[in-house]
Amino acid sequence: MMRGRSDGAQKKRLLTSVCIVAIFLVFLYVYFGSKNSGESALEYGSRSLRKLGSSYLGGDEDSDLGHKQDESAVKFELDDGEDAIIPKSFPVCDDRHSELIPCLDRNLIYQIRLKLDLSLMEHYERHCPLPERRFNCLIPPPPGYKVPIKWPRSRDEVWKVNIPHTHLAHEKSDQNWMVVKGDKINFPGGGTHFHYGADKYIASIANMLNFSNNNLNNEGRLRTVLDVGCGVASFGGYLLSSNIIAMSLAPNDVHQNQIQFALERGIPAYLGVLGTKRLPYPSRSFELAHCSRCRIDWLQRDGILLLELDRLLRPGGYFAYSSPEAYAQDEEDLRIWREMSALVGRMCWRIAAKRNQTVIWQKPLTNDCYLEREPGIQPPLCRSDDDPDAVWGVSMEACITRYSDHDHKARGSELAPWPARLTTPPPRLADFGYSSEMFEKDTELWRQRVDNYWNLLSPKIKSDTLRNVMDMKANLGSFAAALKDKDVWLMNVVPEDGPKTLKIVYDRGLIGTVHNWCEAFSTYPRTYDLLHAWTVFSDIEKKGCSGEDLLLEMDRILRPTGFIIIRDKQPVIEFVKKYLGALHWEAVATGDSTSEAGQDGDEVVFVIQKKLWLTSESFRDAE
């Protein structure tokens, strides 16, 4: 009897062990089988996340980092039978990632152990995760998020819950950058070197240059400005009333939310740094560059950073520099001033004005000074085969970009004053073989298209609904030109592998950047009210990139209640429609391009709105 009971217990233990092993094997089969069943983005339904329950930061260091991007690409010509694997919903990323900027994430740099030179600011440059390290989830808004305050009120105040960071208010409390008041953050318009307001500081610069009425726009001749190390972009914000548009630039550094504040306010801004790569703007884009106590070592590496500004300035352009080196009398500041003065002198810049804490240098109009320099003088002229408009991933060089023979003879940019320059064919059209007639036809075509877009949007928007707008494929900038009478600003994005038409955009008095839409854009989440995507999905499909990744990126940068206008072929529109529920988007309207004069009949216009949604944790915090 005892032996029988023992044998029975033994059999039960054996059976239990077998069951446990079997369950474990089934789990391994399901888990690893689903992980290795392919990298198509449409297989989301079978595997939930590329990196289940974690970000790309938690990936295996020994994984195949050379994985080809086209294995995760989405083909838009889908059969009806594939509907079963379309996701019903996307998971939500952890709340701690509500401000994720995938290509400017220092955690990624630490994780993959990139060897970067911190002294050269390489850690603030773009370093994008490979496809297998990306999220495949929705970036949540912060707890209690509210629809942003409308422009122009937003210039001076934003909701604190939307950017719950007050460290700059404490750190810069004596400089009037920002002040916390109840549930809002106010911006008095101050800066490190203009405590009493950006408006007075701007007027003083215009006065130094003897511009009429102390107006910096100089009767329309000064239109585009680069503000380096811009803080919360009050300088750029106050320039707008003078019909001047600034590209306010700052890195995601110790003042990490400054660009986020700028965009929340409705002020043009971009995350970037003067490090080792050229800024993503073509040559001769700006009439004025500005640095107010921007903490940049302009003497480093043979003046390479000043030479990058020189590349970006138009003939006769200005560099306004407000910093102790321009006025302080201690030994170190005097040394820097002497060396900096000698450097810009060799670059053929001259002092246009110097007063109090500010010096303004001016770039020459012609090559004459460059050609008169002594042989061997530094910095040298750039090689004749150097393309000053090649900027995507191109390293800076410590050399002077000379003018072409045409520009040398013209003694200037030959641009019409603003606002006439918006619709006047610019001289650099000839670089692309475009005629004035082609330019004017393109301008009129996009005017008609924008009129049609506004008719489709009209049931959903008011005059102040939209502020930050992005044209994801700007070409000549005619979409932006058609919005001149709207109270919006445009970030014009030109593909990195197409014609370098961004210089035409700048010549029209607009701003923009170069980008590759197979990667994330250099901005915080929730920073644009309207995205316009003209054949962008078709373009990235040709590159073998993932349409799903692009949808998630568009959702990341779009504000809740914001809009997307997709203009593309019918299969693209059908692809996007299948993801509306997963992204918490809703269709607003569909337009037939054949109804527009001179339109491409293969293109369909699809208008979408992003819903405002909050995580359950956000609801609890809001309560």
Image (tube, rainbow, N blue to C red):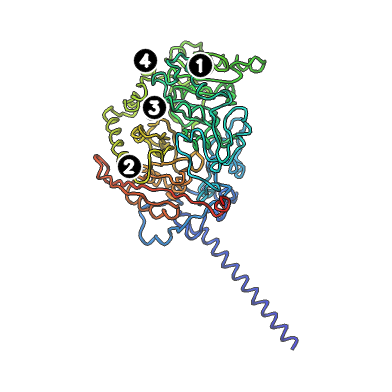
Label 3 sits on residue: 509
Judged from the image, the secondary structure of the residue bearing numbered disc 1 is strand
Real-space Cα distance between discs 3 and 2? Answer: 23 Å
Query: Reading the chain from its start, which is encountered first: label 1 or label 2?
Result: 1
Foreground pick, 281 / 391: 281
Q: Residue 214, percent across and down?
A: 45, 17
Q: Which residue lies furthest to the front in this view?
A: 182
Query: Reading the chain from its start, which is encountered first: label 3 or label 2?
Result: 2
Label 4 sits on residue: 409
Query: At 60% from the left edge and 36% from the top edge, which residue is drawn?
Result: 116
Foreground pick, 101 / 383: 101
Real-space Cα distance between discs 2 and 4? Answer: 43 Å
Q: Judge left or right: residue 173 versus residue 127.
A: right
Query: Reading the chain from its start, which is encountered first: label 3 or label 1?
Result: 1
What mark, if any, has residue 2 been given in the picture?
none
Query: Reading the chain from its start, which is encountered first: label 3 or label 4?
Result: 4
Nearer the observer, disc 3 or disc 4?
3
Label 2 sits on residue: 453
Judged from the image, the secondary structure of the residue bearing numbered disc 3 is loop
**Can see residue 123?**
no
Q: Residue 317, percent across and down?
A: 45, 19
